[in-house]
Image (cartoon, helix red, strand yellow):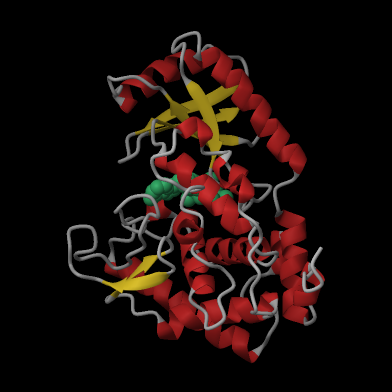
Amino acid sequence: IPESSNSLQDYVKDKLSGQMLELFEACQQQSSDLIRKEKCRTQLQKDIQRVYAVARLYLTGSSMNGLGCRSSDADMCLVIKGNKRPDPIQVLSVLQRLFRSLSYVERTHLIRAKVPILRFREKGSDLEFDLNVNNTVGIRNTFLLRSYAYADLRIRPMILVVKKWAKHNQINDASKGTLSSYTLVLMVLHYLQTLKEPVLPSLQRDYPESFNPFMDIDMVPEGPKYVPPYSSTNQSSLGDLLLGFLRYYATVFSWDKQVISVREAKTFPNNNSREWRNKFICVEEPFERNNVARAVHEKMKFEAIKAQFAESWRILRQRKDLNSILPVRAII
Ligand code: ATP
Ligand code: MG
């Protein structure tokens, strides 16, 4: 271990940082949670292969990317390879019928969104699943996020607290026109990449082979194996990073002029092309030219999001106590 390597305690010398660490330790996904999800995945894949012999089921999202909470759902992607791309709605309808015959599945329903999903629960538990078909970009970005999550010790606590803060303040629900967790994560990574002393690099720029967008999907989970931790000169505490994050989106970031690119570790100007035209928030999907924040389409919701950043920054800078913006006890 190099002499300069830090432990998380080095970033937790003040009260606010200590509260963040405490919340993280209480809420982060446990290995028992992942084992339960993985067990369901294995059984489901087996049952699905009775209908789609060559299909493979992948766990994605926060269950796999290192940014999950105990209460996080299990996102999954069913990959059906072949020359003829199957219609996702049709596949999910078939699965819905199949799942109704499975003893360990309940409350199955189909959501006809842009990326259609089948939502269901493990019987008798609160474990919820969201399954899509062939939305493989979700597998690629899961392993990119996972590499960011482990690139620096501060990333996972920082992001978990931001997610809890956003959920508590009702700005973390894409189905209600606010921010998806995925968008929030990219916003945090962007902030950490663009500090004067960055806490994160662009991993796609520094390790292009590990995150090659054309890599065979079966290889994607192995891709980032050799990405080492990033050695940042930035020694800010967890609390200072949280304050800085709120300040950045309250006072520095230009929502109407800038597009967030984690892929390039910078913003680029909103040039009014199709993806960014008339959007309130522009956050680029790292593997596609797509706006992951397109769910924010009402002016009122957009204003509420901005107001939350401004208000939380104002409060937290006055009183550096996490409880002033997020009731920690109630959440743990
Ligand atoms: P939570 O712990 O709140 O469930 P999460 O990390 O699972 O958070 P979600 O917003 O539920 O985040 O998204 C789950 C996964 O789906 C993401 O990790 C990503 O792989 C994929 N995803 C979500 N939204 C998009 C999008 N707009 N474009 C591409 N992939 C997306
Ligand atoms: Mg999820």
Residue located at (46% from left, 27% from top): 78
The answer, for residue 312, to whether it is visible in the render is: no
> x, y percentage for residue 8?
77, 68
Residue located at (65% from left, 79% from top): 233
Is the residue 284 above or below the residue 322 in the image?
A: above
> x, y percentage for residue 229?
66, 60
* In front of the other: 34 or 314: 34
The answer, for residue 228, to whether it is visible in the render is: yes
Find residue 273 and report its image quarter.
bottom left
Q: Residue furthest top?
A: 50
> x, y percentage for residue 118?
43, 30
Q: Quadrant of the N terminus?
A: bottom right
Q: Residue furthest bottom?
A: 318
Is the residue 117 above or below the residue 242 in the image?
A: above
Is the residue 72 above or below the residue 21 in the image?
A: above
How many tags in the picture?
Answer: 0
Is the residue 312 above or below the residue 22 in the image?
A: below
Residue located at (52% from left, 26% from top): 57
> x, y percentage for residue 26?
76, 57
Residue located at (62% from left, 22% from top): 42
Left or right: where 257 falls relative to 168: left
Q: Quadrant of the C terminus?
A: bottom right
Left or right: where 34 falls relative to 173: right
* In front of the other: 164 or 154: 154
